[in-house]
Amino acid sequence: MDVGLTVGESIERTERTIEGFDLAELSIGEGSDPNEIDADRLESILADADADLCVHLPFEQVVATPVPELNDAIVDYLARLLEWAGAADARKAVLHGTARNPHDTDLRPLFADQLDAIGTAAADAGVELVVENVGHQKRGLPLSVLGDLADETGTAVCFDIGHAYMEDGDEGVDRFLSEYGDLVSHLHVHDARSRGDTHLPLGAGEIDYGVVRKYPVIRRYRD
């Protein structure tokens, strides 16, 4: 099992906190230029800690809109970031599963096309794309829709347990893992409360991790 931590955009935070972990998940801020990141320093920090790199693509960037020209630009933008991630030897890139209007069923085929194109760009860069469930957010696709589209496009999933709980409780976590657990190749693990608190330490919230632990995909990360 590889255990990592999210470090935001900060190399300094990475250096302070990475010891003892297997990977760091470095965020790329929307509109920031990853070429301004001190890649040599990042590589040295990770090498000293014997840790790998994952990246989180910009949180606010939607994947699909009704406008073809914007969709093309989104793919070009993310492909540029993925090229940098590949050059930095990142193993995975996390992409939020979002659309301009996630409840517009006409956008779902466009989302699939976008996801397929972004996945191709990731593969060309030598990075595994993993799409993250954020259905509790305004622009996040619902859990089952995200699962279906990830399955349709052959895209791996970053399953965020806390986000799934915020969207549909323990039942939503259970349902997603029972139907789409074989797609999960990356986990975000934190606790949450139904009143809106999230990204809490495990045990500080309401998630029933007994539900989570029964699935082989989760046991693979624990054993």
Image (cartoon, helix red, strand yellow):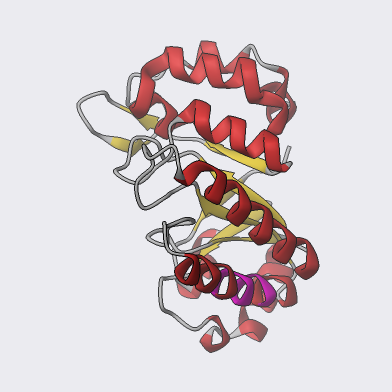
- Tell whether 5 sits left or right of 66: right
Q: Position of residue 118 (x, y in %)?
A: 64, 60
Is 216 colored magenta in this rendering? Answer: no
Res. 69 in view: yes
Q: Position of residue 127 (x, y in %)?
A: 74, 61
Q: How many marks?
A: 0
Work out whether residue 159 or residue 17 is closer to the camera in this orientation and state it.
159
Residue at point 63% right, 71% down? Answer: 79
Q: Position of residue 78 (x, y in %)?
A: 57, 69
Q: Position of residue 213 (x, y in %)?
A: 60, 16
Work out whether residue 140 or residue 33 is closer to the camera in this orientation and state it.
140
- Tell whether 7 sits left or right of 40: left
**139 up-or-down from 54: above or below:** above
Residue at point 44% right, 12% down? Answer: 171
Question: What span is colored magenta in the figure?
Answer: 77-83
Residue at point 43% right, 28% down? Answer: 164
Residue 106 in which image quadrant = top left
- Position of the N terminus by quadrant: top right
> Overall secondary structure of the magenta stretch?
helix
**118 up-or-down from 137: above or below:** below
Residue at point 33% right, 19% down? Answer: 206
Residue 114 in which image quadrant = bottom right
Work out whether residue 111 or residue 41 is closer to the camera in this orientation and state it.
111
Res. 50 in view: no
